[in-house]
Image: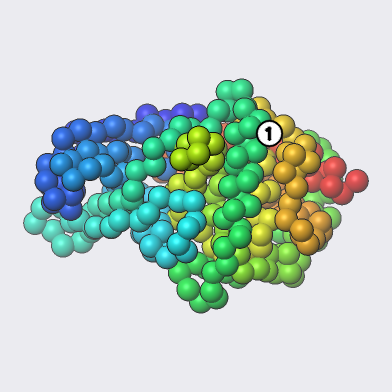
Amino acid sequence: MTRVRPTWPDLPAHVRDAVAAQLGGPVTGWTSHDGGYSPGWALTLQSARGSVFVKVASTEYDVAARLHRQEATRGAALPDGVPAPAFRWITELPEPGETKPAWVVVASDVVEGRVPRTEPWDLDDLDRLQHLARRIAEYEVPDGGAFPTFSDHVWPESAQLVDERPAGLATYDPWFAANLDLIAEIASPERQAEAFAGSHLVHADLRADNALVVRRADGAEEAVAVDWPHAVRGPAYLDQTGMLPAVQATGGPAPEEVLERTPLPAGVDPEAVTVWTAVQAAYFVHTSLQDPPPGIPHVRAFQRIQAESCIPWLRARLG
C-alpha cells in the first residue's frame, strides 16, 4: 500500500518560488517521502538557512487541502514539550493571474529519525509507540481552543450498517452481521458521549506511519509523533488503543497482547474501551465498502484489514 509521491521538480514553478521565498533563499536540496494516505507532496527541503519539512496539496483535493489547514491550526497550538515537530508556517497560493487559493503549503521542523520497524514488527518499537501515546495523553488542552472535543463528534457507521445492511457485509466474519444490532447499541451516540469525554490531548491518527524513532542525548531511543491534522481533546486511552487495529493488520500482535505489554493509564473504564472498539469496527467495515476518495485509491484496502482486526477484538471483549 506504499504510494509514490510527486517530487520537488513536479511542483509548478510559481509554487517552488513561493516556498523558496518563505525559506529566505533557493532550495539547495530535497528529499521526497513516499507513503501515506493523502495525495500531494511530502518533502524535506534544504536551503542556506537549514532544513524544513513541507507538505503541499492542490485544492483540487479538497480533503487534503483541508487537512493541511487543520494541521497548521492544531500544530501551532500544541503545548510546549509535546513530542512533535514544531510548526513553522502555512501559505496558500493561487494560480498565476487568479485569486482563489489553488495550493496549500504547510511547513514544520524536520525530525531526524527513522521509521518504526514493522516488517516484521519490532516489539521495542511497538512499545515506543505505546509509550508515545501515553506521553501525549499526559497533556491537557482547554475546552473551546484549537482542538475539537472528540465527544462532540458522533460516529454514525454502526447505525448506518444496521439501516443499510450492505451486501459487502457477507465478506466479513458472519458474527459481525449477526450482532449488528448489539454493536449499534454499544456504539450509540449516548454511549459514545460518555466514553469519549476527556480533556487530554489526542493525536487521533497515531500509527507507525505517523511516528519517527529518534535518539535522545543519552543514547536511548524514543518515538515522536508527526502529522497532527486530526488532533482533538478527549480521553487518555484513545491513541493507545486507536493504533491497535493497524498494528495487528500489519503483522503485529493482537490488541490485548499489546496492552499487556503497555497497560492503559490508571482509571480507564474498560467499558469505554469496548465502546471505542465497537465504533472502530463499524467505521472500518462501513468505510471499506465505499468507493475510494479521489486521489487515495488504496485507503479502502487499509480500512478493510483494520476492520478484520477490530472484529475479533470486539468479539473477545464482548465474550
The spot of residue 319 in percent (x, y) is 91, 46
> Does 213 sit left or right of 52 as displayed?
right
Query: Which residue is found at the position 85% from the left and 42% from the top?
Result: 316
Query: Which residue is found at the position 66% from the left and 62% from the top?
Result: 235
| Residue 60 vertical position relative to residue 116 in the rendered view, above or below | below
| Residue 123 vertical position relative to residue 288 in the rendered view, above or below | above
Q: From this viewpoint, which residue is outermost toward the front?
A: 218
Total marks drawn?
Answer: 1
For label 1, the SS is helix
Query: Which residue is found at the position 48% from the left and 58% from the top?
Result: 81
The spot of residue 307 in percent (x, y) is 68, 40
| Residue 264, visible in the rendered structure | yes
Q: From this viewpoint, which residue is outermost toward the top?
A: 120
Nearer to the camera, 98 or 166: 98
Q: From this viewpoint, which residue is outermost toward the left?
A: 97
Q: Quarter-wise, where is residue 138 in the image?
A: bottom right
Nearer to the camera, 36 or 63: 36
> Does 288 sit left or right of 314 as displayed?
left
Residue at numbered disc 1: 248
Colour setting: rainbow
